[in-house]
Image: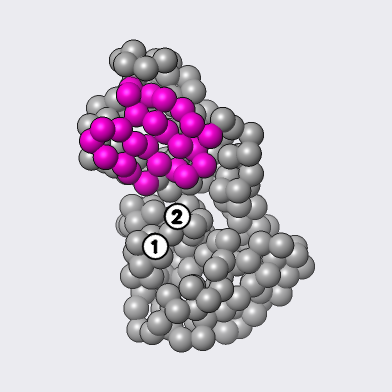
Amino acid sequence: MFKIMLIEDDESLYHEIKDRLSQWSYDVYGVSDFSNVMQDFAAIKPDLVIIDIQLPKFDGFHWCRNIRAHSNIPIIFLSSRDHPTDMVMSMQLGADDFVQKPFHFDVLIAKLQATLRRAYNYNAELVSLKTWCGATVDYEKNTVTNEQGCVELTKNESFILKQLIEQKNRIISREDLIRNLWDDERFISDNTLTVNVNRLRKKLEAIGLGRMIETKVGLGYIAIEEGTLP
């Protein structure tokens, strides 16, 4: 049974989501103190966090930053605001998905299941380590390491990188990446993929590999292999 931490201050919505998720055999925990969410996070040790943007004391972005400072656990944002910048901000902070309020519960479940599947199932089917451009890519730990250092990736970033380097030197279309990553294109925006790829490239730049992920305008993305290691 997966443990879900639901950071939502609207009590009626919290109980509605908790009841519905419980029907799907998820164990849902709330927050006892919105001024100290990390205390509950440490105590619960959840498998996934669902977090509203508008919260008392500090907003959801604040707590996302705090969680990401300690963990790569999957995070799904909820928001009643319709600003595109909210989605962009959430992805830049390392969230895995975004749900706009009001939402149909089937959409939330689909996103939740897809996120958990990406985070906890696909690694079992992969060889844990991969070499690429002189770096070691660890699919289990979601890290890329070379002589310049080590960077940690989110689950989405790791999955995108895996898709690209498993077919290195070949262009992967945006549509294929979206389909493979989110399973159903109805549940994700094209802009979210752009944000994830840009964030991945920025992290890789820290160890000198940012230029090895290229954008092919109108076609997709390609991971270049310079032949340093097979």
Residue at 46% over, 86% down: 33
Residue 45, percent across and down?
55, 68
Magenta region, residue range: 128-152
Residue highlighted by disc 1: 70
SS class of the residue under badge 2?
loop
Number of the label disc, if any, that sits on residue 95: none
Using the numbered discs, state the Cα–Cα distance from disc 2 to disc 1 in whole angstroms.
Answer: 7 Å
The one nearer the camera, 86 or 136, is 136
Amino acid at dot 1 = His
The one nearer the camera, 7 or 166, is 166
Dominant secondary-structure state across the stretch colored magenta = strand
The local crowd at label 2, few if under 14, some if 14 to 19, many if 20 or more residues have their Cα within 10 Å, is some
Residue at 51% over, 56% down: 74
Residue at 39% over, 54% down: 94
Q: Is residue 2 above or below residue 146?
A: below
Residue at 42% over, 33% down: 137
Q: Is residue 219 visible?
A: no
